[in-house]
Image (spheres, helix red, strand yellow):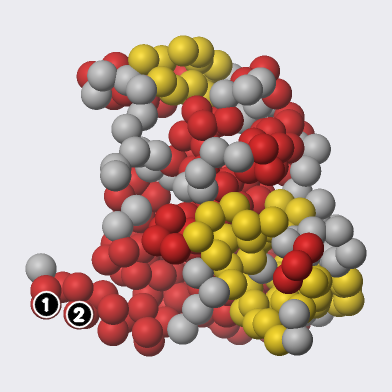
Amino acid sequence: MERRIEKAVVLGAGTMGSRIAAHLANAGVAVEAMCFTDFPTETYREALATLRFLGELEDQLALFICGEFDLTHGALVAQTLGSGWLLEPFIDCALAAAAMLSGAPASAARTQLLEGIASGEKIVIPLRETTHGGGRLQGNAAHASYADALLANVDGKLMVAGDGTERRSYRQFDGCAGAQIQFAASDAVTLASGDTARKAWQAGATAARVGRIAEGVGLSRAVLDTTAEYLRTRKQFGQPIGRFQALAHRMADLLTQCEQAQSLAWAAAMKLDPRTVDAAQVIAHRAFRAIGQQAVQLHGGIGMTDEYAVSHYVKRLLAIELELGDVDTALMRFAAQSQAA
């Protein structure tokens, strides 16, 4: 049965929040509260702490975070966080985990986790590549080393890990803190099963993909800004190297690819249909790879050093490509959906 939203809470800034409130009203949705303030992006916890006043309205909170209509707010925050290379679990927790939990049936465990996400007091992370054997479940994920709760999709069930979880922490090449997770299946709490669990998990996976694409756009813009500044200050033959036509044209091409990736990222955030998300992934993959490689090339040796920010941005861009999944598979899905349409 399709879920209908009857009440909503709108958070936004200025005209964007007003437009969303008007759209909800036209759709017959009662707007219970509005908060038109600048959404802080310094840290994950500070950003979510602004939502404390919502109290028990966890379903309406899921509307804002998960985007019952779209994910534009979440994508905007993810892009801003990306531009600052802030390795916080906003996408995995506030977008992916919240979307999964909002799709699960009402329960005490679900409510507790959603309230924790809303207040910023709990970090909830979905596991990837989950396997099981001998009564124990295993998986891994970025930010899992310090997560307060872990979600898993096993045998058609959406589960939250119980007490006694074993963690083996490690540092990813992009700087994120990850962990290998192992816990007893008997200790896990089932939140949803069957088709409900599948849809909830898919909603979270889609939210994570959109969020990562938006984060990558923010990173790409930061890389382009840093590279442009370098080309304006690095001199050769008595003039800034940015004046050389070949380098200027290369920067223009990279900016064009970044703009294309951003446009499709917003389209995916608004529509959330599989075809648009796949298209956004394909274009983002090409843009991130080109921008990262060319930025290092334009900087020369300094672009590879740990002391220079570009090297860390490029590593994160590569990690986002891996987290998004195989781009050829996404392209084949897009082609199949286009033919079917």
Pick whichever, 285 or 147, lies toward us: 147
Residue 113: x and y in percent read: 69, 42
The residue positioned 50% from the left and 13% from the top of the image is 33
Element under label 1?
helix
Element under label 2?
helix
The residue that disc 1 covers is 339
Q: Is residue 281 left or right of residue 338?
A: right
Q: Where the N terminus falls, by quadrant?
A: top left
The residue positioned 10% from the left and 68% from the top of the image is 341
Residue 218: x and y in percent read: 56, 55
Q: Is residue 49 left or right of residue 83?
A: right
Pick whichever, 257 or 271, lies toward us: 271
The residue that disc 2 covers is 336
Q: In this view, does 156 lie to the left or right of 24?
A: right
Residue 221 visible here: no
Residue 338 visible here: yes
Which quarter of the picture shows residue 186? bottom right
Which disc number belongs to residue 317?
none
Type of the residue with mark 1: Gln
The residue positioned 51% from the left and 31% from the top of the image is 59
Residue 104: x and y in percent read: 51, 48
Q: Mark 1 to mark 2: distance in Å?
A: 5 Å
The residue positioned 50% from the left and 28% from the top of the image is 60
